């Protein structure tokens, strides 16, 4: 029997996020679009993550447990490598999606023949074990490379991209901000477009790019210098702009 490929493959890297993982997986399984595979690449977690994943009997879930901790870039790259779908989507193990996110975003891509899309998102934090939602982030309608390095507002868990665009592209192994570089590499080739009627819920953590700390800005500086070939002046403007936009959206951390 010929192996059936899905319309979209979802890549979910996980490391010790058992506390949030079930909500993330449920948000994927509850999508109105059903034609997908969910690749969960567990990065040698030492919490209860594997047991949580194994509770699910849905055949669309493919668990890939690593025998050694390799990092988020390796996990995402492995997902890209084994994917055979038309589209690839990414979700982090502490974020979750609105019910119609996949369906509406892929319809949008099919209608306008877009290869790289993203959505708005609602940030939230946990306070006293309760979610505190912040104002929805209304991302601009379109990004090219020059715009993105001044306003890196595309959250990774909102991204859907045509697989053929990234079949030879991989995440670099960096301490942080590897997704910023990955999106920069794509945007050097094609533009990205926002789908309005889809939504993601974004958990603000101490390691996220949007948490606006100096460590992240330092790595953006390094990426801009080493990979993006920005001049000193352009790099200064990039880092200041990203910092300003982050403060504007989230406030000081």
Image (tube, rainbow, N blue to C red):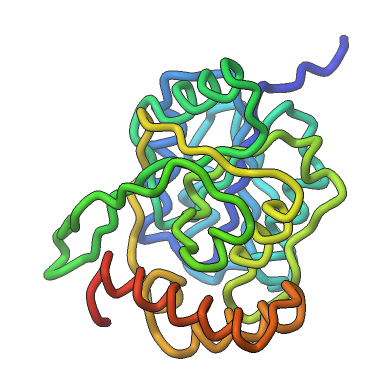
Q: Give 118 or 172, whichever is nearer the viewer.
A: 118
Q: Quick check: 72 left or right of 74?
A: left
- Residue 117: image quadrant is top right
Residue pictured at 42% horizontal, 52% vertical:
21
> Which residue, as the protein is rendered here, is positioned at the far front?
233
Q: Is residue 211 above or below residue 106?
A: below
- Residue 243: image quadrant is bottom left
> Which residue, as the protein is rendered here, is positioned at the far top?
1
Residue 105 at x, y = what percent? 49, 28
Q: Give 75 or 203, whichever is nearer the viewer.
A: 203
Residue 193 at x, y = what percent? 53, 38
Q: Is residue 79 above or below residue 57?
A: below
Q: Quick check: 206 left or right of 115?
A: left
Q: Quick check: 200 left or right of 47?
A: left
Residue pictured at 44% horizontal, 23% vertical:
104
Q: Quick check: 222 left or right of 218?
A: right
- Residue 74: image quadrant is bottom right
Residue pictured at 27% horizontal, 65% vertical:
249
Quadrant holding the C terminus: bottom left
Residue pictured at 62% horizontal, 45% vertical:
11
Quadrant holding the N terminus: top right
């Amino acid at each position: 029997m010929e192996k059936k490929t899905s319309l979209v493959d979802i890549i979910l890297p996980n490391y010790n996020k058992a506390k949030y993982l079930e909500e993330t997986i449920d948000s994927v399984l509850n999508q109105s679009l059903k034609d997908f595979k969910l690749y969960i690449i567990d990065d040698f977690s030492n919490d209860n993550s594997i047991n949580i994943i194994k509770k699910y009997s849905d055949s669309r879930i493919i668990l890939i447990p690593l025998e050694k901790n390799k990092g988020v870039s390796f996990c995402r790259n492995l997902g890209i490598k084994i994917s055979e779908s038309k589209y690839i989507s990414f979700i982090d193990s502490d974020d979750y999606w609105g019910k119609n996110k996949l369906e509406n975003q892929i319809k949008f891509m099919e209608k306008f023949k877009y290869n790289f899309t993203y959505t708005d998102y609602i940030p939230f934090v946990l306070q006293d074990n309760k979610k505190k939602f912040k104002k929805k982030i209304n991302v601009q309608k379109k990004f090219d490379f020059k715009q993105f390095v001044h306003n890196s507002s595309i959250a990774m868990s909102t991204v859907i991209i045509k697989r053929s665009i990234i079949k030879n592209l991989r995440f670099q192994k960096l301490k942080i901000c590897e997704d910023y570089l990955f999106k920069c590499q794509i945007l050097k080739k094609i533009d990205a477009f926002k789908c309005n009627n889809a939504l993601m819920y974004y958990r603000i953590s101490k390691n996220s790019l949007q948490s606006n700390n100096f460590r992240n800005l330092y790595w953006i500086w390094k990426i801009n210098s080493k990979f993006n070939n920005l001049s000193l002046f352009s790099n200064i403007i990039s880092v200041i702009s990203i910092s300003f936009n982050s403060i504007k959206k989230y406030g000081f951390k």
